Image (cartoon, grey):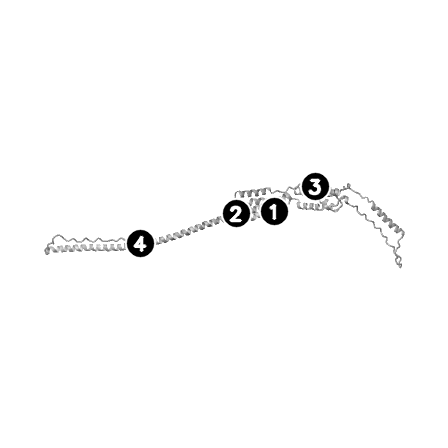
Amino acid sequence: MTEIHNPAPPPEQPALTAPPRRAPAGQRQPAVWLAGLALLAVLPLAWQVWQGHERIEATRQELARRLADGDAQRREAAAGARQNREALDALQAKVGALEARLAEMQGQQLALETMYQELSRVRDDRLLAEVEQAVNIAAQQLQLAGNAEAALIALSGAEARLAKSAQPQFLPLRKLIARDIERLKAAPEADVPGIALRLDAILNAVPNLPLAFEQRPAAATKPKPARQPPADPPSGTPALPEAPTWQNMLGAWLGELWGELRQLVRIERIDRPDPGLLAPREIFFLRENLRLRLLSARLALLARDGRSFLGDLQQADAWLERYFDTRAPAVAEARQSLKSLARLDVTREPGDLNETLSALRNFKLVRDRGPTR
């Protein structure tokens, strides 16, 4: 703190001149008056000097007080700045911890997003695999078995899985599958499973079908003699048993003899060529060849080859007519089934699902090359 000092007046120097001479009283009065006037003139000046000194002292004290207040404020400001710096350091440490936590959370969020994308991709891949499997099953049912109902069930299941996922990237696949479903529903078709079941029934009956050369003539029915009602006895006479006569006994014996003679020779009319006589080994091969013909007809049915199907059925019917007993109910029923099956049209080409399968494979290939974000 700077202090202001008033300069002290210089000490009065002793007069080196000789003391003045006393003037006469008449001459000293104006000097007194002049001294008094000078004193009166000096008094305001002295008063002003004293007032200025007081003001300077007050200013000095005020300045000192203000400097002291400023020093205190400076110290308080320094303490506040130190506290602020400490608080700022603490805040910077907290901000650093928060930034580290934020970076950790961002890393966790990125890991979760990556995991979610992987799970979503795995879910989509599994869904595509299930849909592709369903479409393949439908295509196999159409191409191999001609079973449009099973193909419709498989396609409907695939379309339901895609609809449940509710993802826009699967809309083209859903459109293709829906188109295939509508096309299969609109196309007429033969009852391939029913025809196959009827062929299986004939196949199972082949080992038990009787052969033509094994048939036996029908047993002749003996005519029953008409019995004559006995004559009514006269009233009042009891009925007596009739005694056999030799004529009755002779007639009965001759009738039995004639019946036995008729059994020795029997003449029947045959409206077809003589049935072929087959050895037991040839019988086995005949039945197996007939079964093979029926199996070939079933394969032609599944392949929708109408010409081969009709040819196999006609050949099987010709063998039944030539080598088997056509009067037997089982053979007649088998022939009737073959004739009714031969009138069916199985040449309709089944629909294919190649376009849908190609779209599925291309979609999976695009996903493998560049995963969707």
Instruction: Please tell me whether mark 4 sits on a helix, a strand or a loop.
Output: helix
The 10 Å Cα crowd at callout 3, few under 14, some 14 to 19, many 20 or more, is many
The 10 Å Cα crowd at callout 1, few under 14, some 14 to 19, many 20 or more, is many
**For discs 3 and 2, the disc positioned in front in the rendered view:** 2
Label 2 near label 3: C-beta < 8 Å?
A: no
- Side of 138 relative to 65 (left or right): right
Disc 3 from disc 2: Cα separation: 57 Å
Answer with mark 1 or mark 2, whichever residue precedes in sequence.
2
**Residue 154, label in figure:** 1
> In the picture, residue 174 is in which quadrant?
top right
Amino acid type, mark 2: Glu
Amino acid type, mark 4: Asp
User: Residue 292: x, y in percent?
Assistant: 70, 42
Answer with mark 4 or mark 2, whichever residue precedes in sequence.
4
Disc 4 from disc 2: Cα separation: 68 Å
Label 1 near label 3: C-beta < 8 Å?
A: no
Answer with mark 3 or mark 4, whichever residue precedes in sequence.
4
Residue at x-position 61% and y-position 47%: 154
Q: Residue furthest left?
A: 24
